[in-house]
């Protein structure tokens, strides 16, 4: 929580004192990002937004989880942020009802989010009675409970830890396993064993994703900035396909990884360009919202079971939460 408060203070300062040209106050685009090896880090590393929007002051603030991004959105401290599908589900639902929408899918979560255990534990069934760390109400938490249920494990002790705390708890020996995402996952894999991945769950219909959320007010007041932001995100996805080494190098600089490891982590994600995101499987169109809305409603059922939500909203809540008409 201290990290979130500090980030909000920095963002508030940036918002209250933007750079100005004579007689003109610059618009500020405040972005909340996470250390996930997708196109967002490429855009940040290459400063594409700063180059494309010379009349806009672009600020970046790092967050550890989608729950923290929701907190910042509620405070009005960021305009665009990255959060997993479970935190976005919670944000769109009562009682939060955060006034934001989803204009972009950063990635469909694959092997970059996984259940890893100490090497002596060789199966999910072996987690019975063990202690497992995961960030509550996150995509990882959603996936963990699905994996445990499938294996019939009902007596594991699941505790709420943010990714940096998971790494510390793992090192101390306080936990036996964790469901978490990179870069912490990569550290745990060095002396642990992967028992399940979110890519495997997606193949079974339990899709999770990292999503962009934009404040409704910002999207309405600055559609040209949002359009440029989307254009640069699409550019980043296309770079991963046309010049993977360049894309991995950019991500490596942001995550302090060597090129080989950055390439490996990038390959763990499923990245979609704008055309693919318009398909019925994902965002869809204004007239026909995509299946992402159904995935979010499924996450809401999970959150009700975890007492994170009081009730499952109607599907239309999530369909209206998709901003489909801004894609390039």
Image (spheres, rainbow, N blue to C red):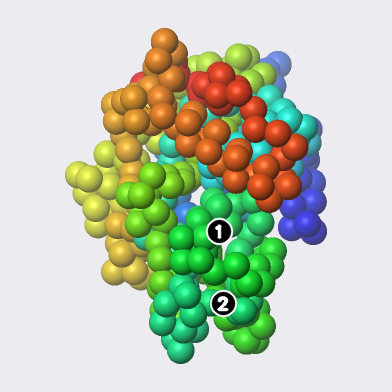
Q: Residues within 10 Å of mark 1 (few under 14, many from 20)?
A: some
Depth check: give the residue in front, 6 or 274.
274
Return the x and y of residue 60 as percentages of the image width and height: 60, 44
Return the x and y of residue 202 as percentages of the image width and height: 37, 49
**Vertical placement of residue 266 versus 184, above or below:** above
Depth check: give the residue in front, 287 or 105.
287
Disc 1 on helix, strand or loop?
helix
Left or right side of 160 for 52? left
Numbered badge on residue 279: none
**Vertical placement of residue 76 versus 314, above or below:** below
Q: Residue furthest top?
A: 287
Depth check: give the residue in front, 24 or 193.
193
Q: Residue furthest bottom?
A: 120
Q: Badge 1 is on which residue?
A: 145
Q: Badge 2 is on which residue?
A: 128
Query: Reading the chain from its start, which is encountered first: label 2 or label 1?
Result: 2
Return the x and y of residue 139 as percentages of the image width and height: 54, 51
Q: Residue at x 48, y 31 (%)?
A: 294
Report how far apart the C-alphas of labels 2 and 1 lie in the structure. 13 Å
Q: Residues within 10 Å of mark 2 (few under 14, many from 20)?
A: some
Q: Residue at x 46, y 44 (%)?
A: 209
């Amino acid at each position: 929580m201290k990290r979130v408060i500090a980030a909000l203070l920095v963002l508030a300062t940036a918002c209250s004192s933007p750079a100005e040209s004579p007689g003109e106050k610059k618009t500020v685009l405040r972005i909340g990002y996470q250390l996930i090896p997708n196109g967002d880090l490429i855009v940040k590393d290459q400063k594409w937004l700063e180059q494309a929007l010379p009349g806009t002051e672009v600020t970046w603030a790092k967050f550890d989880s989608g729950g923290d991004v929701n907190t910042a959105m509620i405070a009005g401290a960021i305009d665009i942020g990255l959060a997993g599908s479970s935190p976005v589900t919670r944000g769109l639902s009562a009682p939060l009802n955060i006034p934001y929408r989803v204009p972009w899918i950063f990635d469909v979560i694959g092997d970059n989010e996984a259940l890893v255990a100490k090497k002596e534990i060789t199966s999910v069934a072996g987690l019975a009675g063990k202690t497992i760390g995961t960030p509550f109400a996150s995509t990882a938490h959603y996936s963990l409970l699905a994996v445990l249920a499938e294996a019939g494990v009902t007596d594991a002790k699941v505790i709420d830890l943010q990714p940096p705390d998971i790494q510390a708890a793992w090192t101390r020996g306080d936990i036996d396993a964790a469901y978490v995402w990179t870069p912490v996952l990569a550290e745990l894999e060095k002396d642990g064993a992967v028992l399940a991945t979110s890519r495997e769950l997606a193949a079974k219909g339990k899709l999770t994703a990292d999503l962009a959320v934009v404040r409704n007010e910002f999207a309405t007041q600055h559609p040209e900035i949002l359009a440029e932001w989307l254009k640069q995100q699409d550019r980043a996805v296309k770079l991963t396909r046309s010049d993977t080494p360049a894309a991995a190098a950019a991500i490596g600089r942001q995550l302090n990884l060597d090129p080989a490891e950055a390439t490996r982590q990038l390959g763990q994600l499923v990245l979609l360009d704008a055309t693919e995101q318009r398909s019925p499987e994902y965002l869809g169109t204004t007239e026909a919202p995509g299946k992402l809305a159904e995935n979010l409603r499924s996450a809401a059922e999970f959150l009700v079971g975890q007492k994170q939500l009081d009730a499952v909203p109607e599907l239309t809540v999530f369909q209206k939460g998709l901003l489909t008409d801004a894609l390039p």
